[in-house]
Image (cartoon, helix red, strand yellow):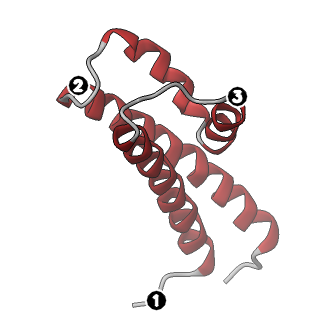
Amino acid sequence: MTVSKRPKLTYSFAALGLTIAILIFVYLEITNFDRLGEISVALILILCPPALLSVVFLDIQPHSVEIAIGWLIIGILNAGLYGAIGASVSKHFCKSD
């Protein structure tokens, strides 16, 4: 069973979006949610726009299940965003099978 290029590219972009969100969360956990510089915040918001939702989590304790669930939601939203970008790219650049 082979998957055509268009869905494969869409799924690959979605996986990339989820991976980016996971890496950001892991970085924040490792650095103990220390204050980030302006460049770091800009880079995070460019790579993971749903990370803006983390403002809602200001009252949640770091290193808790609640913050992990919140970042899981951000990761799913970022995967959806990247998947939509991947679908658009594949629609325009991959020829039909």
| For discs 3 and 1, the disc positioned in front in the rendered view | 3
The residue sitting at the right extreme is 92
The residue that disc 1 covers is: 2
Residue at 62% x, 72% y: name it. 6
Q: Circle 1: is it few (<14), some (14-19), or many (20+) Cα within 10 Å? A: few
Q: Residue at x 41, y 49 (%)?
A: 22
Q: Amino acid at mark 2?
A: Glu
Determine the image quadrant of residue 27: top left
Name the side, left or right, on which 64 lies relative to 32. Answer: left
User: Residue 66 bears which disc, if any?
Assistant: 2
Label 3 is placed on what type of residue?
Glu
The extreme left residue here reads 65
Residue 67 placement: quadrant:
top left
Q: In the rendered structure, which disc, 3 or 1, sits on the residue that comes first in sequence?
A: 1
Could you tell me which secondary element the residue under label 2 belongs to?
helix
Q: Is residue 49 above or below residue 19?
A: above
Callout 1 secondary element: loop
Q: Give the quarter of the figure containing the C terminus.
A: bottom right
Point out residue 1 in the picture as x, y percentages from the top left corner: 39, 90
Q: What is the C-alpha distance between the residues marked 2 and 3? A: 26 Å
Mark 2 neighbour density, 10 Å: few (under 14) some (14–19) many (20 or more): few
Q: CA distance from mark 3 to mark 1?
A: 44 Å
Residue 37 in picture, x, y percent from top left:
65, 30
Which residue is labeled 3 in the image? 38
